[in-house]
Amino acid sequence: MKFVAFSVFTQKYAIEIEKVQEVMVMPKYLEVPHTHEFIEGVVDLRGEIIPVVNLRKRFGIGEDNREAKKYLIVLDLGGKKFGLKVDGIEGVIEATQNDISSSEEIGEINKEYVSQVIRKLNDIYICINPERIFEFSM
């Protein structure tokens, strides 16, 4: 299986590549008032308005006030498009069934958004369940 790997703060995450439409530098966005705090806003992607979730806020990590470059991962979930604002892009990783463990092995982390864990060499990637990330924004 292939995954798009990315980082939020110091943790590495992954999402199934089939759900990813594209990855880009975070474009300008329009803030939307009176919505969930983790909704960063919306972006106009070639004429299509897409809601953007800030994963730092969604995971309760806190905002990064540095002027560092951020990225947008655009997902297509059954015809509905959403964006994830992340700190960094690690690239595409390939995992075999032997590399993948259940989310029960993670320990203290909130498993609400986690589907599984990937171990590749010395790295651990938490696979997120994007449908749960966007549950309140749908």
Image (tube, rainbow, N blue to C red):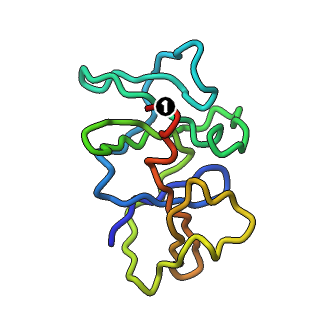
Single out the residue that lies furthest toward the bottom. Answer: 98
- Which residue is found at the position 39% from the left and 36% from the top? 82
> Considering only vertical position in the picture, is 85 above or below 102?
above
Q: Few, some or many C-alpha atoms within 10 Å of disc 1 (few <14, some 14-19, many ≥20)? A: some
Provide residue 95's location: percent of width, then percent of height: 40, 77
> Considering only vertical position in the picture, is 76 above or below 102?
above
* Observer-nearest of 64 and 95: 95
- Which residue is found at the position 55% from the left and 60% from the top? 114
* Observer-nearest of 123 and 38: 38
Label 1: state its secondary structure.
loop
Provide residue 126's location: percent of width, then percent of height: 55, 64
- Which residue is found at the position 50% from the left and 63% from the top? 115
Provide residue 59's location: percent of width, then percent of height: 65, 46
User: Is residue 33 toward the left or the right of residue 46 in the image?
Assistant: right
Which quadrant would the N terminus be assigned to in this image?
bottom left
Provide residue 50's location: percent of width, then percent of height: 37, 27
User: Is residue 45 toward the left or the right of residue 107 in the image?
Assistant: left
* Observer-nearest of 44 and 69: 44
Instruction: Count up the numbered dots.
Output: 1
Which quadrant would the C terminus be assigned to in this image?
top left
Q: Which residue is mark 1?
A: 137
Q: Quadrant of residue 21?
A: top left
> Considering only vertical position in the picture, is 26 above or below 17?
above
Q: Quadrant of residue 73?
A: top left
Question: The disc labelled 1 sits on which kind of residue?
Answer: Ser
User: Is residue 94 toward the left or the right of residue 101 in the image?
Assistant: left
> Considering only vertical position in the picture, is 80 above or below 23?
above
